[in-house]
Image: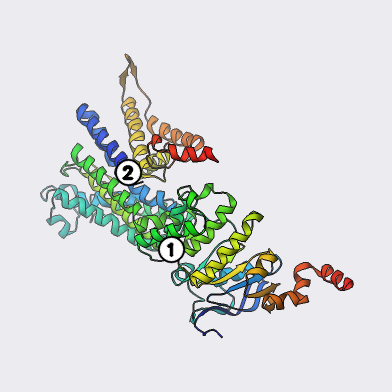
Amino acid sequence: MRRPGDSLRASSVSRSFEGVHALRDVTLELGRAEITGLIGPNGAGKSTLVNVLSGFDRPTSGTVELEGRDVTRWSPSRRGRHGLSRTFQHSHAFRSLSVRENLEVAALGVGTVAREARRRAAELLETLGLTSQAEALAGTLAQGDERRLGVARALATRPRFILLDEPAAGLPEAEVPDFAQAVRDVRDDHDAGVLLIDHNMALIMGLCDRIYVLDQGRVLAEGTPDEIRANLDVAAAYLGESAVHDADDEG
Amino acid sequence: MRRALLLQLLAPLALVALAALVGTLVSTSTETYVINALVNVVIVVALYVFIGNSGVLSFGHISFVAVGAWAAGVLSMPVEEKPAIMPHLFGLLGEHTVGNIWSLALAAAVGAAYALVVGLPLMRLSGLGAGIATFGVLEITHNVLRYWEKIGPGLNTFSAVPETTGLLQASLGAALAVIVAFGYRRMRFGRLLSATREDAAAARAVGVSVYRQRLVAFVLSGALAGFAGGLLVHMLPVNTESVYLDLTFLTLAMLVIGGATSLWGAVVGALAVSAVDSFLAEAESGIHLFGRSVDFPAGTRIVVVGALMALVLILRPAGLTGGREFSVPLARPRRLLTKFAR
């Protein structure tokens, strides 16, 4: 069992937008050095949860704790400086800065000294296979490279917790295995807790230590990949009722 | 890599030096235009530090030029001249006079302090809100300086201020502004601010406080603008009209025409538009060109500069320099090769 202070935790978080309940009483805990999957259909509240966890949105009720401290009212930048990092679903690269500068600036942002920022950027360019693009402007990258830059930039802050919002979306199929390995390395080499949102079920099932299933703003299920796979409720929410019933008929 | 960086500093400095050189070769009346152009460089570089690096618009920077001019003008005017021009001045201000360098340093300090006071509430705004609110600052400053005669000449003109801003002082001032702006952009502060310009949300996600970075730039740019005001009041008799709307428009046009996101663009824009503006100002009062007499109607200057700005915005939205720093085209064959290799 993990120590209580060593996690990023959302407790009974609700968020409603003018009467629409995007999140209802969601409790989720993300431990260090493990990959936690977050799945659910479009509109289930996954991105809202990431926004609440990272400080870009405030919950209507409930709290967010980072390593035992209540950070619910903290700004995103303050959370960033305290070891919580995230990527975005759509490209948020610093487009007219070079790829290298994107990484160095991210390291500088959390207070790293310039020399160390330079070293860290060079290292991340290497591990994420961006070295040949280092001096290119971020706005000119191909989609695969751009996705990897997003993850590299989040890592440049040396996060203890990192939230990856559909990082593999738009990645060419051939690049997915390498990308999966990169996410594993984040857990194993950086000891970071990873929250991974993705629609690619094979990727999620292959990578995650634990999975949360979100549907209509509620946590529908939580468990290991095997437990989740076995859970028919999940299939209903994820694949649609008909798919589940078809499977039942055949079984 | 290092050489490319050095060039980014040396190119604008060389341009300033070139302008100074031109100033030594021309007639005294034309020299005044060159000096004015160099003071414009300082103002536009100040604008670049904030607007160029943050991507947030400010119509209020000429306020900082104005308070700088007021500080330097009030304090460097000889004590015996003050009662005639500024009869209602606060006692303390009336009894003291400082030297040239001190008055310039004070102008910068007052510009920075004022920018801090204004920036603390306003740096929470961006986009349209920031533009309009800073415009409000310009109006407030203008009216305070115009009617508060205890801190300056009010509606009078700053005559009798020692005219120390000659070619030397103007070019050294411009060079100093360029060096400060260059240094700032390479520092942590400048790098973080340009990240917020590219994508504010992503900058926040990596720990950057957008508000704090904008405030730092605003204060530094206020200091440079105040310094420019000091140079200006030591150059010509300033009044509230000379540091108001026309100067706001002209310097913003220079920044936009040159290319707002680079120091090189700021210097190129300031000098190029100053040249056009000076020529038109002369032409308004009648000149001889290629054996013909040219006599443009009054107001041509601003009409042409306005049209020029619109034209550049349409044809080359990032400005004449494309908003990029100076680089030698020959230094890039490697990148071209890799492009073809793919």
Depicted B211 relative to depicted B161: above or below: below
Q: Earlier in the sequence, mark 2 or mark 1?
A: 2
Q: What residue sits 16% from the left and 50% below the top?
A: B101
Residue B169 at what x, y percent from top left? 19, 42
Q: What residue sits 51% from the left and 36% below the top?
A: B314
- Give the SS element for disc 2: helix
Of all residues, the one furthest to the left in this rendering is: B80
Of all residues, the one furthest to the top in this rendering is: B291
Left-right relation of B337 to B296: right
Label 1 marks a residue whose chain is B
Question: Mark 2 or 1, which is nearer the eye?
Answer: 2
Left-right relation of A212 to A96: right
Residue A168 visible in the shown view: no
Residue A223 at what x, y percent from top left? 67, 79
Q: Which residue is mark 1?
A: B208
- Give the SS element for disc 1: loop
Residue A156 visible in the shown view: yes
Left-right relation of A102 to B162: right
Dot 2 amino acid type: Arg
Asked whether B276 or B265 is in front, the reply is B265
Give the alpha-carbon distance from disc 2 to disc 1, as whole Å.
29 Å
Q: Which residue is mark 2?
A: B3
Q: Which mark is residue B232?
A: none
Q: What residue sits 49% from the left and 83% below the top?
A: A5
Left-right relation of B68 to B125: left
Q: Quadrant of the C terminus of chain A?
A: bottom right
Q: Dot 1, crowdedness within 10 Å: few (<14), some or many (≥20)? A: many
Q: Dot 2, crowdedness within 10 Å: few (<14), some or many (≥20)? A: few
